[in-house]
Structures are given as structure tokens and as C-alpha cells.
Image: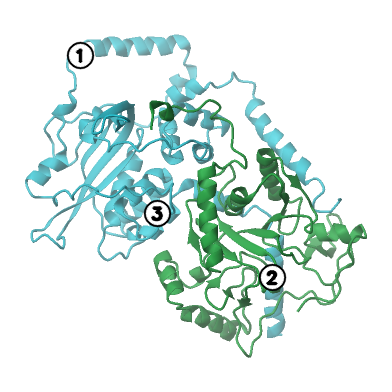
Amino acid sequence: MSLRDLLPAAGAFRYNFAFMDEGAKREVRRALLKAVAIPGHQVPFASPELPIARGWGTGGLQVTMSLIGPDDVLKIIDQGCDGSVNAVNLRKLLVATTGVRTTFDSRESTLLQSRHRLPEIPMTEGQIAVLQVPLPEPLRLVEPSEVETRRMHAEGDYARMWVSLYEDVVQNGAISLAAGYPCRVNGSYIMSPSPLPRWDLPMLNQASHLTLLGAGREKRVYAVPPHTSVRPLEFDDLPFEVESFAGLSCARCGSTGTFLDEIYDERTGKPSRVCSDSGFCDLVQAGVVPAKGAPHD
Amino acid sequence: MGYVAVQGGITAIENSQKLNRYLRLRGQSAPLTVRQIMEQMAPLVDRVMSEGSLHSPFHAALALKQASGDPIEASFLLRAYRSTLRRLVDSLPVRTDQMRILRRISSAFKTIPGGQVLGSTSDYEQRILDFSLAEETAGTQCDAKREFESFIDGIEESLDPDQFRKVVAMLRDQGLVAPLAPALSAEPTDVTQESAEFPLDRSGRLQMLARAETGGLLALAYSSMRGYGSIHPTIAELRVGYVRVQIPHPFRPGAAVSLGSLAITEVEIVASVRRSEQEEKPAFSLGYGACFGHNEVKAISIAVLDRAMKSPCPHAPAEDQEFVLLHTDGIESSGFCSHFKLPHYVTFQSDLDRLRNLQGSEE
């Protein structure tokens, strides 16, 4: 070390490519490698503050920032939509600090950062989905202490989780967990698939793409590598159910096999349905891909 | 690309930001200078430095200006800025017993070696709105300043850092508090370099408390003082003043270089008698709190919570490390709280699906 090292370098106030400094990026990538090697296991990382608020996608953002290169094509969606306020804000930050090309077409993207949705068109080999996670711990439902949940994961002690699902059935007649439904990954760890709707979970199972999940505030990353089993928790005599949109279709593109958002007309208050995946809906409208028919099962 | 939900999103955000900036300016009063904030709102600047975890009065005051005075927003700006700074070197442990004292009191003894030094405090003021401040001018400000300066000129006495022996050291000599634990051999924990793992060691706990939000700490410490726990603290010593920050000399092993000094508040409390595992004799237990700047409520709250978290069998919320440390960071809690304003269309749709399904199954 020299005295010069102690002084701020000239231009120290300019930001690095993708904002984070290279040392911090390397730390995230090391955690990600471990996460990929142990599917569904939550790996701690330092998670420094970013210029985006905690809870607004800082985990996903750090994963994206640590992986993105100048040749990447980026898609950012929030609840399925490219134009949602926070997706716009995150995209602006990443474009300003990297200059990469962005797209609304999920098929073109190499990196896809998302909050709470996977695209309707299944992602393919070579693509990476980065999911923003608010609460990475699926066992928080039954246990508030982090020390205790880590022990439960380590010992595969999931009895209380199963009991809570059973009690749910007894009290409500069905499992009332909606989004973020707990899944068993690679037959081992129970994982919270971020608050993806149940609709998207079949797309995580044995997927061709890599899924990385980042929780900034809780300082955890975890992963589902390609070709890995992701099984929602279910009882033999009570199969897992995705959201039902039976008899409904998208008012714009006519798809009947997509996750539909319920919207109410601003003037008449009349309800209708539109695809939650705005990029997919636009492609159908433009005649690039056909409307989605039969719901996946 | 004209999706219903996409339309207007980008423009609406930009317009909202424009409006936000405009609201600060619309009253047409003279611009508030960063220096004014630094000098006339020092406790607020201190609080932002402490919660923003970066000691720089200029940057903290600038953040306050940008945040229109909102301390949590300003601390967030400062933390995000901190992330971009290079970490140069670890300082040597700060010697608070060598502090240049601005204020130093003990509520354990009426007189203490070195004496009680009240310094600056609003503790004994009647909280009556001072309407003369509304009429303050450069002239009245100058007069008041001159009057105080001539008053202070008449005082001969000076404070020597060596005259203030720690009150706790005195108690320790008498065997009333447990002997000092051996100095840390390992590097102290740094939660900005790796995420906190529980149970967290004391250095990590004190670091997280020092960065935590004043109001959050106060609420939890108060719960412990009031009834959810059993910490009835006696402030052995509260001191506010300047401490020297030193780093190891880059070339001469064993020597130190002084970088300057910064103001901190330090509090040591003694609480209920506790028999430690190793010691035969019962002794007072200690709680320690320190934070940037002059913030006594924060430092006392930290000390109470530090002691509360040492409870051998935690039962109250303030005694539970995870409960206290994971819920008092202002940047994290406010960020997560405000994220609920983000669209939750998909997740709510999923909730609706479950509810309608459950309602259907009951019919």
C-alpha cells in the first residue's frame, strides 16, 4: 500500500460499468456459483445499498449488474409488464450505466429481470431469468427466526410446513396459499419461487433456462439451474392447482391460455381481462406469434 | 408497442419527478445552502450520517437538502452514495477514554472524578416555542453570538482529556462490574462486507445498532424499559465529544497516522445484577452504545438494547437479536414499507383466485 492508495483517484465520482464496483460484482457472482451448485439453497451475500430502495428489486438488480456485459440484450418486466413504473425506473438505471440494448420481446433477451412473472413464451437455453424476491424464506410462514429456519433447511426438517398446509386444508377446504407457492427443488430444499403466481411454476420445472433469484434486503441469492425439478408442495389426494381463468380470454389478443389480469374500465367500471405479459400480448397483436389457446397443465 | 398498462408509464414517472422537484422551489424563498443545514441543523445532519453510515457532514447536509429534510430519505441517499466509495483501510480502535469532551454526565454518582460537564443540552429547557426566532435577522444572530463569545472568553478553565477517567473503569476497579473481556483477536464483523449471520457477535450487533434508525431503536428500547423486558438502566456515563481516528502507518509497522477527529456520542449503562458463568461473584451487567454525532436518545437506546440482547434466556422482543437488528434499519424497513405501493396486480389476481375458489367451495 502506498499513500497514493489512500487518496481518491481522479474521476472517482464517475460510476463503474453497471454501477457496482468490480469487487462487489465478483462477490455476488461467487455467491451465485454456490447457489447454482446447490439448487434452492439460500446463499448469503453482502448486498450493499443501491440507488434503488430496498424492497424495490435491489436483489435482482445486483444479480443483473454482476452478470451483465456490453453484448447482453436486456428485458425488464414488473408483474409481467415492460412499462410498469418500477420496470421503467430499473431499466433507466441499467441503460444509463451500461448502454446495453433493451427489448420488450422476451425471445430476444439474454438477461431477463422480472418481478413476480415469467414470460408466457418459455425461455430457452442460454437465457437467464433474474427474479426479484421480497421474502426468500418459505419457512417464514411457520417460523420467524432465521437461526431456526436455517437449521430446518439443513436438517430437511419440513414437518411444520406440511402440517401448516394440512391445517389450511382442514380449515379452508383447500390450500389458500396464492402467489409464491412453496416448491421443492431438485427433491431437496423447499424454496420460495419469489411471488410468482402458481401459473408460472410449471415453467420453472425442468426449464431450459437458468433462473437466479435475488433478495436484496434479506441479503440472499438462490438459483434453479436448467433441467432441475421444481415441484410445488402437494398432497397425493389434493393436487396442486394453478390459477383458473376458465372461460375467460384476453380482451386485446384473444388468448385464453395466458395469465390474465382483471381490469376495470375507468369510465364504466366494467371488468375485462388482459394478458399480464404485455410483451407477449403485443407480439400476438402484431401477428408475430399466435394467441395462446389451451391452458398449460 | 402500445400496451394499455405501458402507455403513459414513462412520461408519468418523469412528470411526477418534475413535480417533486418543483414543490421544493415553488415558495420562492431564498435557496437553502448546504452550509446552513450543516451549521443550523447539526443534530439532523448527525442523525443522517449515523443512519446513512457515512461520516461526512457535507454529504449528509446535501442529502437533507435533496430530500427536503426527510431524514430517512436523506440517509438512504447517503447509504447509496457510500456504496460507490472505495474502502481504503480499517481504522485502529477509537480511544473514547481519550475523547475531547463536549459533554459528559453520570446519573450513577453525584460527583465523579473529572466532574460532571453539562456542555450543550436541551434537557433542562422548558419547551416553549420561541417566537423571537421567527424575527431572527443576521443582526440579532450576530449580537447573540458576540454576547456568548465574550461570556466564554472570561472563563479560564480548560478541559484536559486525561482528567476524565471512565466511570465504568472506576466501578470495575471495585469489582462491581465484570472485568473487561480480552481484546478482539479476530477482525471485527462488518455487516457491509458480508450479510449478518445469526447469532451475530457483539461487534456486528453494535455496528447494526449504530446504523439503525433512531426512532426504531427508541421504540424497542422503550419497550424494554417500560415493561416488555427488565432493563432498568442507570447511565454510568454519557459522553459527547471528539475522538481521534487513526490508521496503521502504511510503511512503519506499529506506528499510526492520525486522519482527524469526529464527534460521537457514547453511553455506558449498568443494569441488573447478573452472575456470569465464569465468575463466582455477582456483578452489574453493562450495556454499551455509540453513534456518530450528538444523538443521546440513540446512544442510550443502543446501550439498553445491547444489554437486553445479552439476556441469557430472551423472552421479550427487545431481547431477541433477530427481532431487534433485522427490524430497525431505516433504509431497509422504509424501502420495504414503500414497496407496497408498487403494482401487485399479478399477486393480487392470484389471491383473488384463491378467495373465489374458497368461497365457491363453501357454497
Q: Which mark is residue A54?
A: none
Marks 2, 1: nearer the viewer? 2
Q: How far is the residue under mark 1 from the one under mark 3?
A: 45 Å
Q: Secondary structure at mark 2?
A: loop
Label the green chain with its letter: A
The C terminus of chain B, quarter of image: bottom right
Residue type at mark 2: give it.
Ala
Q: Position of residue B168 (x, y in %)?
A: 16, 42
- In the foreground, A55 or A280: A280
- In this rendering, would B157 be left or right of B141? left
Q: Nearer the viewer, residue B137 or A61?
A: A61
Q: Which residue is mark 1?
A: B155
State the CA–CA distance, disc 2 to disc 1: 79 Å
Q: Pointers 3 and 2 in contact (CB under 8 A)?
A: no
In the image, residue A36 sits, relative to residue A155, either above or below, namely above
C-alpha separation, residue under disc 3 versus residue under disc 2: 38 Å
